[in-house]
Image (cartoon, rainbow, N blue to C red):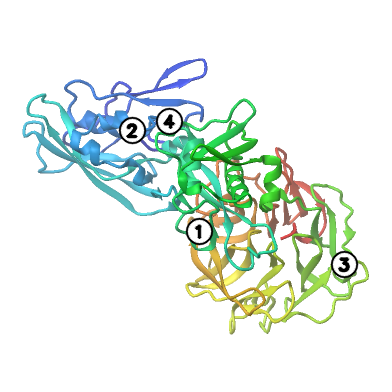
Amino acid sequence: MGADRGGRGRRTPARVMTYAAGGVLLLAGCASMPDSGDLRGVESTPRQDTQVRVFAVPPGEDAPPSEIVQGFLEALTSDDPHYKTARQYLTGEAAKTWRPELSTTVLTDGPGAKPEAGSGGEDTGEISYTLTGTKVATVDAQQAYAPATGAYGRTVHLTQDDKSRQWRIDALPQGVVMGESDFQRNYMSVNKYYFASNTTAARADTQPTAVADPVYVRRRVDPMTQVVRSVLSGPTRWLGPVVRSSFPTGTALPKKTGALTPDDRNKLTVPLNDKAAGVGTNRCEEMAAQLLFTLQSLSPVVEEVELLADGEELCSLAKSAADAAAFRSSTRDPDYLYFVDGKDRLVRIPAGSSDPKPDPAPGALGEGDTALRSVAVSRDEHTAAGVSLDGKSLYVGSLVSGGSLGEPVLRSHGRTETDRLTTPSWDAHDGLWVADRDPDNPRLLLLEEGKGDPLEVRMPHLDGRVQAVRVAADGVRIALVVEKGGKKTLLIGLIEREGKPGEQQTVRVVELRSATPELEEVTAMSWAGDSRLVVVGREHGGVEQMRYVQVDGSTPDVPAPAALTGVKEVTAAEDEGLPLVAYSVDGIVRLPSGAQWQKVTEGTAPVYPG
């Protein structure tokens, strides 16, 4: 259990076998746990290729308590779908009441185990062991990941059967526990999708907007069926207040439903219980779109979803038609990359291009009459916003030649440039967000459609001052860099709205949580996918680094961007095929997939639309 352990104690024969292409591998054994003496660690399964299968071994005849505990912990890291082998290490009653699906606790290393003093021994017929470690994260019953810190300590109790004389565990904590490398091998992150429920991001005259809700599922235990069940069960508690599911409440797979697999035409048929019977075609297609968006990252690829209820077909939706049923930001490719050139005006080059000769953006912001320090372009690329060079004024203008700029839509009264307006950010429904860093009146502001009186966004639980703002395309999640006590951290929050369309709304940012708890100085960030961000920052005492993070605080299973020094700003598109772009000491640079950073041109403040 766990990651990167050195050998400790005497070695025992292997208790876990892994099957890989081309042969059978027998892993080196785990450190034994004596009934007395110093704390010993349960050896972690080394990090393996993700295609390697791990199978648990049942308890041996007359195995002592130390081997029972060791074997049980190893069995938790296997690919046994229902933990049948792990239950063989438990008494009959304990096997019935143990619920491994309730939680997964992830430790830096696998759990150490030590007999509790005075808890008995082999000659008394009972003994207790304390499992210890340092927590990294937890995954709850909804499969939601959350970073965790502090010490882990739980007790397992064993008894010896009077007749068979075999040792078994009769009391243990609910859930499972394992080291970080075993977790990375056993679990994978999948985005499941729901629809924005707030009154602006889900207006009646527009498509429903898909919102990603990342969960962790067991990688090699029928992930397709796991993910479908997870979608049907509803959103995670954190995201739940701002999204809805098109599946009627109580919808589930019928009992005794087997593994879900697509047919030879990559069509997946999903049977549902009677709760889904009678839904209309439009709603059914939204239901199918939720599944198609969710299943996109799994293999084999699903090209079509057919939904059944009580054996009758409800609807069928092809992947090519899913975007007509619902809007998903990562399917909209930007036309241009925008930035500020040496003349302090808005310029652009085609997205994905390395052309070093930008063109002035059409409209007043590209004409150079107003010197700019930062910009943001609406996601439909019809409108742009720019902050003046001194940081005091926010302008909004059309990206149409000949358009006039007019007066600023917002002014800051901060005394210095760093105490004034941040780079603005657009959501997918033409909401323009910006923070005023004035220490005497710090505010997060929203201008609906980029005009009118700014609406002050309430942040009842914010502890610190906002230094940067990026709104997700879905309009219900927001990323904030918040400064407090000299530290700058990345927080992800939910946008809640109250009020009817056309009326003055109350907007709040709630449920703020850290996406980078280990970083104490975040200097730049951008959304880089439906639930992923790219972040530039440093750990305590560390050097500057660029990495990807998930909104839940986990690290995605993708390579980190190549190192780049002196990064001041970074931008990414929701379309993960487009290159990262940054402003560094070398000017505007881009990182194509599989390549190194390349200089594009001189300039500052690069942004994709959003």
Tag 3 secondary structure: helix
Crowd class of label 3 (few under 14; some 14 to 19; many from 20; radius 10 Å):
many
Q: Earlier in the sequence, mark 2 or mark 3?
A: 2
Q: Quadrant of residue 363?
A: bottom right
Residue 244 against residue 442 in the figure, above or below: above
In terms of secondary structure, where does tag 1 sit? loop
Q: For the residues marked 4 and 3, what is the alpha-carbon distance in whole angstroms?
A: 55 Å
Residue 35 image position (x, y, % from top left): 16, 34
**Horizontal side of residue 303 vs 95, given as left or right:** right
Reading the chain from its start, which is encountered first: label 4 or label 3?
Answer: 4
* Percent position of residue 587, x then y: 78, 56
Q: In the drawing, does residue 356 fall left or right of residue 442? A: right
- Give the image location of residue 505, x and y in percent: 60, 77
User: What is the spatial separation of the Cα atoms under label 3 and label 1, in whole angstroms?
Assistant: 39 Å
Whether residue 469 is visible here, answered yes or no, is yes
Q: CA distance from mark 2 to mark 3?
A: 62 Å
Left or right of 243: which side holds 346? Answer: right
Q: Earlier in the sequence, mark 4 or mark 1?
A: 4
Locate residue 27, reporting x and y percent. 39, 23
Q: Which mark is residue 83?
A: 2
Residue pointed to by mark 3 = 366
Q: Residue under label 4, please give it.
A: 46
Observer-nearest residue: 478 or 394? Answer: 478
Q: Which residue is mark 1?
A: 239
Q: Earlier in the sequence, mark 3 or mark 1?
A: 1
Residue drawn at the location 31% of the way across and 23% of the way down = 57
- Disc with the residue nearer the chain's start (4 vs 2): 4
Circles 2 and 3, Cβ within 8 Å, touching? The answer is no
Q: Which three-letter amino acid code belongs to the residue tagged 4? A: Pro
